[in-house]
Image (cartoon, rainbow, N blue to C red):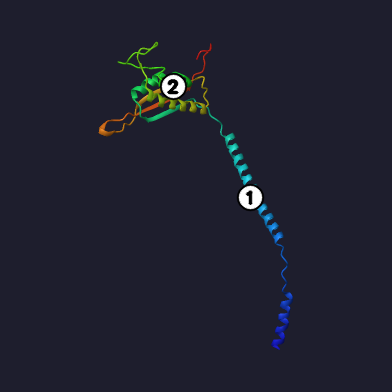
Amino acid sequence: MKEENKQPAEEKKKKIEAKPLPVDKEKTKEIEEKMRQEKKETAEEKLEDKVEEKSEKKEEKKKEIPKVKKEEAIARGAGLPISKKHSVYLCRFIKNKKIDQAISDVEKVSKFKQAVPFRGETPHRKGSMERGRYPIKASGYFINLLKALKGNAITNGLELETTRISIASASWARRQMRRGGTLSKRTNIILKAKEFPKKQGGKE
């Protein structure tokens, strides 16, 4: 009886099992390629949406933050390896001048075309001035500081035509020791520029 019951069960299993369908390799490849393209398109769309959201947020922040016009521009040089004496005379030479004019004058000094007025026992120079020298090394550092001052004035919203160098000061910095115990030259320089509006009659 047990053997008779097993035989119909096995016949039922054979009937239930389905034969595998024929598979077309070309169609499967096409379907896989379509799926990949769809995934790529969705990923690209998500990236575009993220980029657009970031750009919108940045624009909103820029609109929210109002630009505040500052009253002055500052440029500082700390621990510069130049003489304090030369830097003091260059500060006097630059003070109360426009930034562009000061840059052009200092460039002339570096090319031996214009001398900086000095005091004490120094040789006389050609022209209306009496005593003067050509501090070439210090003038190179001053040109860089003046260019930085010009950039700060532009970012702060100052008009270059009406801005002048109001403060130019030089002071001793911390001096390091060299070989043999000699002190090296180190100076701190501060340059400040402000707007001076024109008075009535066209004069500043």
Quarter of the view holding residue 7: bottom right
Task: Give how far across and how far down residue 27 sits, in percent.
Answer: 72, 59
Q: Residues within 10 Å of mark 1 (few under 14, many from 20)?
A: few
Residue at coordinates 71% horizontally, 85% vertically from top-left? 5
Are the two marked residues, 2 and 1, in contact with CB atoms closer than 8 angstroms?
no
Task: Give how far across and how far down residue 180 sits, in percent.
Answer: 25, 33
Task: Give how far across and how far down residue 100 sits, in percent.
Answer: 48, 21
Residue that carries the numbered disc 1 in the rendered image? 43
Q: Nearer the viewer, residue 189 or 125?
A: 125
- Compared with 72, 24 (above or below) is below
- Compared with 112, 188 (above or below) is below
In this view, the residue farthest toward the left is 180
Q: Is mark 2 on a helix, strand or loop?
A: helix
Residue that carries the numbered disc 2 in the rendered image? 107
**201 to the left or right of 174:** right
Q: Residue 6 carries which label?
A: none
Residue at coordinates 38% horizontally, 23% vertically from top-left? 136
Q: Looking at the picture, which amino acid does disc 2 mark?
A: Glu
Q: Nearer the viewer, residue 181 or 94?
A: 181
What's the CA distance linking mark 2 and mark 1? 57 Å
- Compared with 51, 174 (above or below) is above
Q: Residues within 10 Å of mark 2 (few under 14, many from 20)?
A: some
Q: What element carries label 1?
A: helix
